[in-house]
Image (spheres, helix red, strand yellow):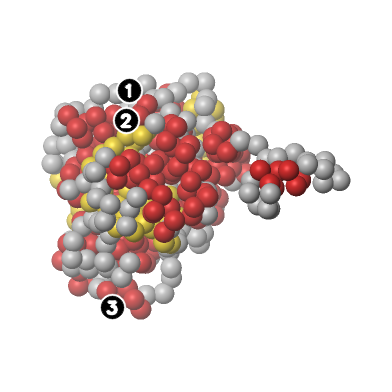
Amino acid sequence: MEFVTGLRCVFCGGDYPAKRHLTCPRCGIEGILDVQYDYRAVARRLTRRVLAKRAGNSQWRYRELLPVRTESAVPDLAVGWTPLTAAPALGRHIGIASLMLKDDGRNATGSMKDRASAVGVVKAREARRKIIACASTGNAASSCAGMAASMGLKSVIFVPERAPEPKVTQLLIFGATVLRVRGSYEDAFRLCQQACERWGWYNRNSGINPYLVEGKKTVGLEIGEQLGWEVPDWVAVSVGDGCTIAGVCKAFRELQTLGLTARMPRVLGVQAEGAAPVTACFESGGTLVPVAPRTLADSIAVGVPRNWKKAVLGVRDSGGAMINVTDEEILDAMRYTGRLAGVFAEPAAATAVAGLRRAVAEGVVPRRASAVAIITGNGLKDIRSAKEAVGEPFEIAPDGGGLEEILRSRGLVAL
Ligand SMILES: *Cc1c(COP(=O)(O)O)cnc(C)c1O
């Protein structure tokens, strides 16, 4: 917390010390707070030269920009410094000059949520709590449970009825107490909130916990550093609650403020058509109108996003845009991202690629641009949707009967 100067409400602008509050005492649960830093002091410490010499390829290399105490122990699991790889064939397919994928499915529990949960468990330890709780449709929960397990904390997780089975199983493997709420995500969120207040557990809900977004920020910091401080023209990321994109925007703003990069990329936020309240806010300039979410991309099926304002402000600040895609476009993107880049993205992650493709087709992103798409979660976490995208394998007899016909039909052997 060496460089943290306080918390600022994104609604009323009120400033608070970085101690007691999770949300603004004046605005209540709507009053999302944003961590403030002394960037002048950070800039003196965090130079390109210092970073180049710094060992430890994880998100903790940006410790000066994270709201944790200098002496706090951090999880030893792999979090951050995920691969950023060129995807030329995929770039050609979506019609853009240069495309790279930032594969955050490679984090310890398989999603970008690990960046936030890692900060969450450190904060829970700092607050001397033994139990961390979370309400989530999946990835936030499984990463919270995994990080908790690695730090010797207990976790209590509230999941809505429709959470995908692989993610729920992952929770159980990490030893979490899993409560499947016969209801929606909203119900799970409220129950978790009440339980944390009643029993004094640490609340990992990133929608309202200002520290967690700071962890998500590191994906943007890494993109800057991995590209030698030359940021791309565009960065595409999917949007549910809005924390991820808010973190990404904040990261690029910080890199510029610190003098590490010369400019900011434009950030493209992508929502599923059936759950797009943040895009609606971005376009109308008005306040949130909740929706009943309808999309197969469970990780971004959020009808009442808590961080819509931070997200909209961030995208505006970057000079970026918001766009929606259909579930068909998402499934299609899962297929072509796998085939053309060798990356298996879960639906919410493929959404970023689908959005970039549509943005290029509509002229929002120019064809000559360079872009990075953030793959926020691994496809193995939601096999049902993946199967919907790709269907079944060929069946052949044990004696190989039918093999040649199949290979011919696929053009793998000469006719
Ligand atoms: C949570 C999540 C997102 C969206 O992040 P928000 O902070 O909810 O906007 C995108 N993709 C995956 C895989 C996620 O788990």
Q: Is residue 214 above or below residue 201?
A: below
Task: Tell me the kind of residue under disc 1.
Answer: Val
Q: State if disc 2 and disc 1 touch (CB < 8 Å).
A: yes
* Residue 408 location (% of width, % of height): 68, 46
In the drawing, what numbered circle is on residue 276?
A: 2
Packing grade of label 3 (10 A; few <14, some 14-19, many >=20) is few
Determine the residue positioned at 24% across, 29% down.
280
Q: On the picture, is 207 further left or further right than 404?
A: left
Q: Is residue 4 above or below residue 363?
A: below
Marks 3, 2: nearer the viewer: 2
Q: Is 67 in front, or is 227? A: 227
* Residue 235 location (% of width, % of height): 30, 52
Q: State if disc 1 and disc 3 touch (CB < 8 Å).
A: no
Quickly name the residue at label 3: 49
Packing grade of label 2 (10 A; few <14, some 14-19, many >=20) is many
Q: In the rendered image, which quarter is residue 39 located in?
A: bottom left
* Residue 388 location (% of width, % of height): 56, 33
Q: Is residue 362 visible?
A: yes
Task: Tell me the kind of residue under disc 2.
Answer: Ala
Marks 1, 2: nearer the viewer: 2
Task: Tell me the kind of residue under disc 3.
Answer: Arg
